[in-house]
Image: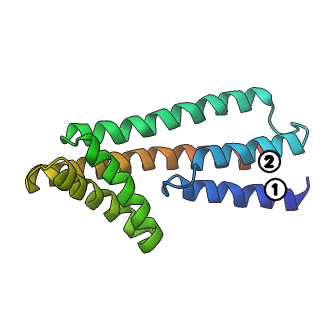
Amino acid sequence: MNIFIVIVCFIIMLLGLAGTVVPVLPGIPIIWAALMGYGWYSDWAYYGLTAMVVTGVIVALSLAVDQLASVLGAKKFGATRAGMIGSVVGAIFGVIFFSLIGLILGTFFGAVIFEMVFSRRDFKKSLAAGTGALLGFLTGSLFKFMVGMGFITYFIFALIVG
């Protein structure tokens, strides 16, 4: 086992794990790509193509669940399309300028501001929409983080047992 390649794949997986929270990085696909890369490099000695197909399906489902959680969270609290767009814009702006706390606050305030400005909603309804957008984002992020941790755990387990 080439320890350097294992370390590189593990670092890529940790980058992907960060991407489960940061919206500009496709976290789960990055982790999956590292799994695929190591499988290909090791000539599938530790896990096979069947595992990659199963994890690939999980990647697709996790992306769908993440989007669904965000939309349903925002919709449940009355967000309009403007609020959903605002939450994404706010999240990106927040993470660029203020790191993780900016990501969280940006998601909330982006939805609130866009609801008030573009949908002309009152402050109370805008706050509810911001809350929904934030809860949907946090739920989706937690789900993706758990899937990412599962993939990384599988990788480590396969190397130890394999």
Q: Nearer the viewer, residue 124 or 43?
A: 124
Q: In the drawing, does residue 147 fall left or right of residue 72?
A: right
Report x, y in % for residue 149: 58, 49
Q: Nearer the viewer, residue 159 or 114?
A: 114
Mark 1 in CB contact with mark 2 (< 8 angstroms): yes
- The answer for how far apart the CA atoms under marks 1 and 2 are is 9 Å
Residue that carries the numbered disc 2 in the rendered image: 159
Q: Nearer the viewer, residue 61 or 111?
A: 111
Residue 57 in which image quadrant: top right
Report x, y in % for residue 67: 42, 38
Looking at the rendered image, the disc whose residue lies closer to the viewer, 1 or 2, is 1
Task: Please tell me whether mark 1 sits on a helix, a strand or a loop.
Answer: helix
In the rendered view, tell whether residue 59 sits above or below residue 110: above
The coloring applied to the image is rainbow
The residue located at (56%, 59%) in the rendering is 18
First-in-chain label (1 vs 2): 1
Q: Amino acid at mark 1?
A: Val
Residue that carries the numbered disc 1 in the rendered image: 6
